[in-house]
Image (cartoon, grey):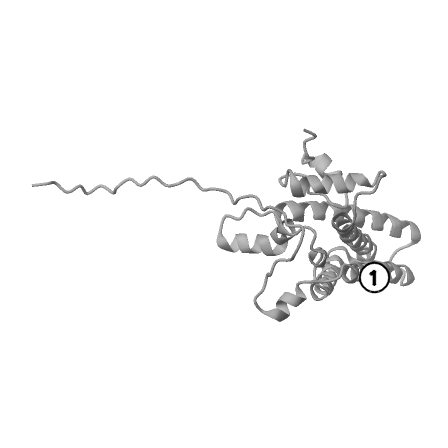
């Protein structure tokens, strides 16, 4: 009579594999939503979000100066601190949020919707920034966060931060929409192209390479 083993059978588990790199497509656009209204709202002209963030920065600076929350010298200092803070936030969000490891279906969907679609269609000019509705929400949220956190300093800091945001959107759009210039500005095009086409695990700065230098994520020259 054949004996029956009570031990659990050993099953070799296949090692987890990473998703294959997305091959960039320079024509067309991805469909993110089945709902035609949501799909339409996911596209925008770059001038709208750039204008909203630039206007937020201008209004914030003007209000802070005319209502006595800061003087000319302190306003400049707060503006520069806010601008520097944005470059760091830009780097961290790009690295740790937009490139979150797609270890679950939910994460994969989030990553693709937020940023993966841009890597697949890098020349899609209508998806290089958030839609106006979300832009207004983010600008408003930033105001309340800064006002609650920094009090009267918020107006100068927010001005620099939102100006940095507008600059980032414009630079990012220019990099993908226009050919590289034949001057010192070409460094932006080269740096971001390395991230898109050769080494997507480095070169996370877009409007500035400062934090890539400091943290050590500059692309390899090889």
| Residue 79, percent from left and from top | 84, 51
> How many numbered marks appear?
1
**Residue, disc 1:** 55
Left or right position of 9 against 122: left
Front residue of 168/221: it is 221
Q: Residue at x 62, y 68 (%)?
A: 38
Give the answer, above or below, for where 25 lies relative to 199: below
Q: Quadrant of residue 203?
A: top right
Q: Quadrant of the C terminus?
A: top right
On screen, residue 161 above or below 189:
below
Q: Residue furthest front?
A: 27
| Along the viewing direction, whichever of 210 and 145 lies nearer the viewer | 210
In the picture shown, does residue 203 fall above or below 152?
Answer: above
Q: Residue furthest left?
A: 1
Measuring 88% from the left and 50% from the top, which residue is drawn there? 76
Residue at the image position 75 percent from the left and 39 percent from the top: 190
Viewer-nearest residue: 122 or 75: 122
Q: Position of residue 46 (x, y in %)?
A: 76, 59
Position of residue 80 measured from the top left corner of the image (x, y, whole percent)? 83, 47
34 horizontally vs 5: left or right: right
Q: Secondary structure at mark 1?
A: helix
| The N terminus: image quadrant | top left
Q: Position of residue 212 (x, y in %)?
A: 71, 38
Q: Nearer the viewer, residue 16 or 162?
A: 16
Q: Residues within 10 Å of mark 1 (few under 14, many from 20)?
A: some
């Amino acid at each position: 009579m054949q004996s029956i083993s009570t031990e659990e059978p050993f099953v070799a588990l296949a090692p987890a594999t990473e998703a294959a790199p997305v091959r960039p497509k320079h024509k067309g656009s991805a469909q993110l939503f089945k709902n035609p209204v949501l799909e339409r709202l996911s596209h925008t002209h770059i001038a709208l979000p750039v204008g909203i963030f630039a206007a937020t920065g201008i209004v914030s600076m003007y209000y802070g100066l005319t209502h006595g929350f800061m003087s000319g010298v302190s306003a400049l200092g707060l503006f520069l601190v806010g601008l520097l803070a944005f470059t760091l936030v830009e780097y961290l969000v790009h690295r740790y949020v937009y490139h979150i490891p797609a270890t679950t279906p939910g994460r994969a969907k989030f990553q693709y919707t937020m940023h993966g679609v841009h890597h697949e269609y890098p020349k899609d000019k209508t998806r290089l920034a958030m839609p106006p509705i979300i832009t207004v929400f983010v600008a408003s949220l930033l105001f309340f966060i800064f006002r609650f956190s920094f009090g009267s300093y918020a107006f100068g800091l927010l001005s620099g931060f939102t100006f940095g945001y507008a600059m980032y959107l414009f630079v990012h759009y220019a990099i993908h929409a226009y050919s590289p210039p034949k001057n010192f500005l070409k460094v932006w095009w080269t740096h971001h192209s390395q991230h898109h086409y050769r080494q997507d695990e480095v070169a996370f700065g877009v409007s500035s390479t400062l934090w890539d230098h400091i943290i050590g994520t500059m692309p390899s020259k090889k």
